[in-house]
Amino acid sequence: MAYRVVVAGATGNVGREMLNILAEREFPIADIAALASSRSQGDEIEFGETGRMLKVQNIEHFDWTGWDIALFAIGSDATKIYAPRAAAAGCTVIDNSSLYRMDPDVPLIVPEVNPEAIDGYRVRNIIANPNCSTAQLVVALKPLHDAATIRRVVVATYQSVSGAGKAGMDELFEQSRNIFVGDPAEPKKFTKQIAFNVIPHIDTFLDDGSTKEEWKMVVETKKILDPKIKLTATCVRVPVFVGHSEAVNIEFENEISAADAQRILREAPGIMLVDKRENGGYVTPIECVGEFATYVSRVREDPTVENGLSLWCVSDNLRKGAALNAVQIAELLGRRHLKKAA
C-alpha cells in the first residue's frame, strides 16, 4: 500500500532531512506535499535525490482531508495549531516538537525500543518523536536494560549546533570565520561564543538548576524505556555542525561484563558497535553524518560501582535524533495499523 504523506516544515533542516530519508528508504508514497510558512510559499524543494521538485505550500491554507501521514518539524507553537487540525481530518501526525511528548494520550516512540506503544496512537491520532539526545541514548540502553536491568544512568552530552537549527549552524560558521580574520564574534543565537568553545546550557533553566534539555532526557527515557530508571544529565553545546555525542555511565541491578555488553550491542537493532581499543578505534560525530545507525564505542567496566559500565554513543541528530526516527515511526505505523485498515 502507498500513502499520501505530508512534510510540514519542509524547508528547515529537519524537514529537508525527512524528505531525503523518505526517498532513501523508498517509503511507499502515492502523493507527497511539502508545507512551510507563508514566507516559503511557492518555493521549490527537491524530494531527496530523486530529481523531483516539490512546490512548497502554505500550511495555513492546507486541506488535510485525504492525507494519511504528516511528519511535523515546525516547532511547538505552530504544532499546537496545525497538529489537531490534521489529526481531526484523519491524517496521523508524527510530531518532532516537544509539545506532545509527555501527554499520556500520545505515544512517545523509538521503534527499536518501544514499538508496541504505538498501538495507543488512535486516542489523539498523534505520535511524538523524542528529543534528539534521548533518541540515541535509549537505542543504546534498551538491549542492555533487557539483559541486566538498568538502575541509574549518568550522561553528559556533546550536542552539535544543528540541534539549534539553521541559525545555530550559521552562528558557528560566522564566528569561526570572524575569529580567523580578527573580527568580533558576538553571540546571537547562543548565550556565549560557540566557536572554539563549549556551552553547558541548552534550552531554559529550571528551578532546580537543571535545564529543560536535561529534564527532557530524564522524563522521556522513563516514558520510553522504564519509569524506574534514575537518570541525571548534563547537556553541553559544542562547536560541531552535525552529530550528537554522549558519554554514558550505567549502573545495573545484575552483573554484566564489558564483553557481554559488546556482544549484546553488536547484535542489537539500530546500533553499530565500533569498539577497537586502539588509536582511532571509535566513532566521532563527523563520521556519523548521513548515517542511519547509532554508534557505540569505548565500552568498558566501571570499577567504582558494582555492576557498572561506561560507553560512548554518537549519532546524526538530524537523522536518528529527528527525521529518521519520524520516518521509522511512519513505517511502523504502516506495518501495524494503516496496512490493516486498508
Image (tube, helix red, strand yellow):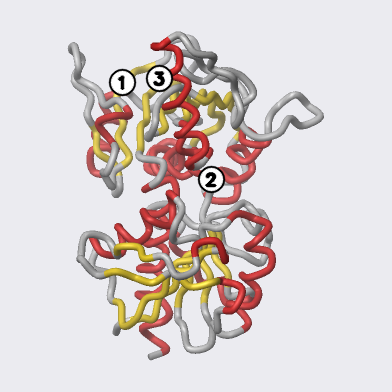
- Which element is circle 2 on? loop
Task: Give amino acid for label 3.
Answer: Arg
Residue 298's tag is 1
Q: How many marks?
A: 3
Q: How far across and how far down the image is residue 228, in percent?
A: 62, 41
Q: Nearer the viewer, mark 1 or mark 3?
A: 3
In the rendered structure, are the residues bearing label 1 and label 2 in contact, judged by CB atoms less than 8 Å apart?
A: no
Q: Report if residue 310 is visible in the image.
A: yes
Between residue 271 and residue 238, name the one nearer to us.
Answer: 238
Can I make out residue 268 in this image? no
Name which residue lies at 39% across and 38% down.
140
Relative image position of residue 232 (x, y in whole percent)? 61, 27
Disc nearer the start of the sequence (1/2): 2
Look at the numbered discs 1 and 3 and tell me whether their residues touch, using CB distance below 8 Å. no
Mark 3, residue position: 177
Tell me the CA gap for discs 1 and 2: 24 Å
Q: Looking at the image, which residue is at 42% across and 36% down? A: 148
Which quarter of the figure is the C terminus placed in? bottom left
Q: Amino acid at mark 2?
A: Asn
Residue 207: image x %, image y %? Answer: 81, 29
Density class for disc 3 (Cα within 10 Å; few <14, some 14-19, many ≥20) is some
Tell me the mark number nearer the camera, choosing from 1 and 2: 2
Whole-number angstrom distance, CA of label 1 to CA of label 3: 33 Å
Q: Write down the residue under mark 2.
A: 131
Q: Residue at x 42, y 32 (%)?
A: 244
The foreground one among 151 and 239 is 239
Residue found 37% across the figure and 76% down from its top: 32
